[in-house]
Image (cartoon, rainbow, N blue to C red):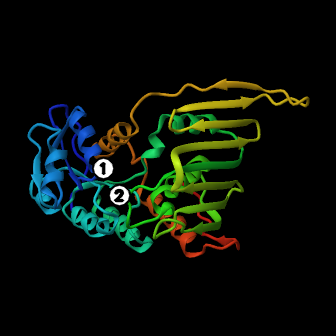
Amino acid sequence: MASSKVSSAPERNLRVGVIGAGVMGRNHARVLSELPGVELVGVADPDAGRASQAAGQAEGAEVLADHKELIARKVDAVIVAAPTHLHHQISLELIDAGVALLVEKPIATTVEQGREIVTAAARNGVTLVVGHVERFNPAVQAIKQAVAGEEILSIGITRVGPFPPRMSDVGVVIDLAVHDIDLIRWFTESEIAEVQPQISSVIAEREDIALLQFRTANGVLAHINTNWLTPFKARNVQVATRDKYIMADLLTRTVTECFGFQKDGSYGMRHLSVGHTEPLRAELMAFVDAVRGTKKPAVTGEEGVASLEIAIRCLADPHPAFRRAPRKVVG
């Protein structure tokens, strides 16, 4: 099987398709239609009306019934934004056809399915990226830069909001907390070694409150507070290092750093510079670079599986006793 990487010659547009015309699929189609050097070939969805709405954002983009029709059009790459339970089958068929893919989080329904996707992509030399778009939030990028070289002591993340009517197949852990599990692993450059979950269902069929505590393999304590009960959205991150305390609002994209702690309790404070790039645009530009072979995938399949594994562990073991996870350090 040939590699999915394509020539970066300027005259060669990257032919890309989108599978799934829900909220994320439509956003992917919108951004792809604006990217230079990219041709949105088509949007595939069983709902022709939704697919037409998404495809209409790019001149010449086709409305297609399924991923097989995209494969038949010899696309170079595809965004898999279909429901999670379809990721496994669709991804394997794309990989078998040599098509590069960005799979929206979570990579699959189970860890076993996720590993099958990763193994197949490696075996066939196909570029595989997982869509953890929060890494591309300019505020998150500023945090990552601020903690570089620092000894991180603790991380606290709050991600709350009202119940989304569109949600039916997963609860807050898979829908929301998996973003922050990925961020904890990314900030600390370490695997999560211990998990202490507390979850509950109040108004939804699946869990709608989750208080998750973690210890990473390199000793960082972290917690995630997430729910669908708060009437407004909030996305906040606090990181304590040996020499700094960083506070960030991921919605307003403001990041504040406290530093220079003195014995009398005084310290300095400054606002960090934060970019303005749309996270999804940055993610898709990074994906295009990975497909062209000019950069490595920003979020690998292995990383996507690792974060899914921790999320599933939280759901499988929702009680106070700490459980140990594999102590594999992120490379």
Residue shown at the point (65%, 42%) measured from the top left: 238
Give left or right: position of 271 versus 169. right
Residue shown at the point (24%, 56%) measured from the top left: 20
| Quarter-of-image position of residue 108 | bottom left
Secondary structure beneath label 2? loop
| Quarter-of-image position of residue 218 | bottom right
Crowding at dot 2, Cα within 10 Å, few <14 / some 14-19 / many 20+, comes out as few
Secondary structure beneath label 1? helix
Q: CA distance from mark 2 to mark 1?
A: 9 Å
Report the quarter where the N terminus lies: bottom left
Instruction: Give the number of the disc on residue 166.
Output: 2
User: CB atoms at circles 2 and 1 under 8 Å apart?
Assistant: yes
**Residue type, label 1:** Val
Instruction: Give the number of the disc on residue 23.
Output: 1
**Residue type, label 2:** Arg
| Closest to the observer, 152 or 200 | 200
Q: Is residue 296 above or below residue 121?
A: above
| Closest to the observer, 231 or 29 | 231
